[in-house]
Image: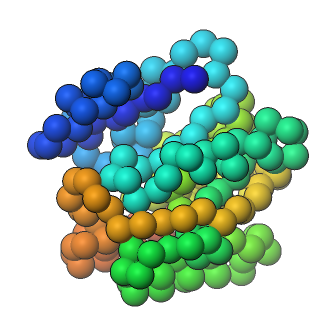
């Protein structure tokens, strides 16, 4: 198992702490969640079969990764999304505008493709060969919803499982704690869904 941390312009001790715990650190100077994920994917070791994405702010529990991996390893799913709304989110961990944005995006996916989701949570696992077929390209806020929409369009087997979600204990909340960034993220997510529907 390889742990890869994509350093996306951090100004704290991310690199130092990650390396001290044995992680491989890759640098992506372009800000954006999608850009960081794409950069990390370039460094996957040969033989990788399943990829788990999660945030490095301790809001998600790495101990729950096995629950995401198991349906894929057993051949029952191609993509498993950790749902914070089905799981146990700590009070205040999901802010009202995050909850609203999630509901709206998930409703639009259901309206266009009749696929029900409860969350666009970043904690997720996917078979690498399936991920390659999705041809992911979004470099910022649309990464998670792009993956889900393309997975539906390509007929991947998708599951949601409950995961816990806590208050972040490391780093700065660049999106949910900032109204302007949250608005930009919301617009990009909705735009990504609508663009896919039109195409």
Position of residue 27 measured from the top left corner of the image (x, y, whole percent): 27, 28
Q: Quadrant of residue 141?
A: bottom left
Question: Could you say which is closer to the camera, residue 146 or residue 195?
Answer: 146
Residue shown at the point (51%, 46%) measured from the top left = 62
Which part of the image, by quadrant, shows the N terminus?
Answer: top right
Which part of the image, by quadrant, shows the C terminus?
Answer: bottom right
Q: Quadrant of residue 193?
A: bottom right
Q: Where 78 sits versus 192, above or below?
A: above
Q: Is residue 170 left or right of residue 127?
A: left
Q: Is residue 125 left or right of residue 19?
A: right
Position of residue 84 measured from the top left corner of the image (x, y, whole percent): 56, 69
Q: Is residue 191 left or right of residue 157?
A: left
Q: Quadrant of residue 184?
A: bottom left
Q: Is residue 8 visible?
A: yes
Q: Where 63 sits versus 190, above or below?
A: above
Position of residue 76 measured from the top left corner of the image (x, y, whole percent): 87, 46
Q: Is residue 94 visible?
A: no
Question: Could you say which is closer to the camera, residue 22 or residue 130?
Answer: 22
Q: How many marks?
A: 0
Residue shown at the point (56%, 73%) measured from the top left = 88
Q: How is the image coloured?
A: rainbow
Residue shown at the point (79%, 74%) measured from the top left = 114
Residue shown at the point (70%, 62%) measured from the top left = 161
């Amino acid at each position: 198992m390889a742990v890869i941390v994509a350093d996306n312009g951090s100004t704290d001790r991310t690199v130092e702490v990650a390396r001290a715990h044995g992680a491989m650190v890759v640098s992506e100077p372009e800000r954006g969640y999608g850009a960081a994920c794409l950069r990390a994917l370039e460094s996957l070791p040969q033989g990788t079969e399943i990829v788990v994405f999660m945030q490095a702010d301790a809001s998600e529990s790495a101990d729950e990764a096995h629950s995401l991996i198991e349906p894929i390893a057993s051949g029952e799913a191609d993509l498993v999304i950790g749902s914070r709304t089905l799981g146990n989110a700590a009070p205040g961990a999901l802010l009202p505008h995050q909850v609203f944005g999630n509901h709206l995006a998930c409703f639009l996916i259901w309206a266009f493709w009749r696929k029900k989701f409860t969350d666009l949570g970043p904690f997720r696992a996917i078979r690498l060969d399936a991920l390659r077929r999705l041809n992911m390209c979004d470099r910022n806020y649309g990464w998670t919803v792009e993956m889900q929409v393309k997975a539906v369009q390509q007929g991947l087997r998708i599951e949601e499982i409950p995961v816990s979600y806590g208050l972040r204990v490391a780093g700065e909340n660049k999106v949910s704690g900032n109204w302007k960034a949250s608005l930009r993220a919301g617009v990009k997510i909705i735009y990504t869904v609508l663009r896919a529907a039109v195409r």
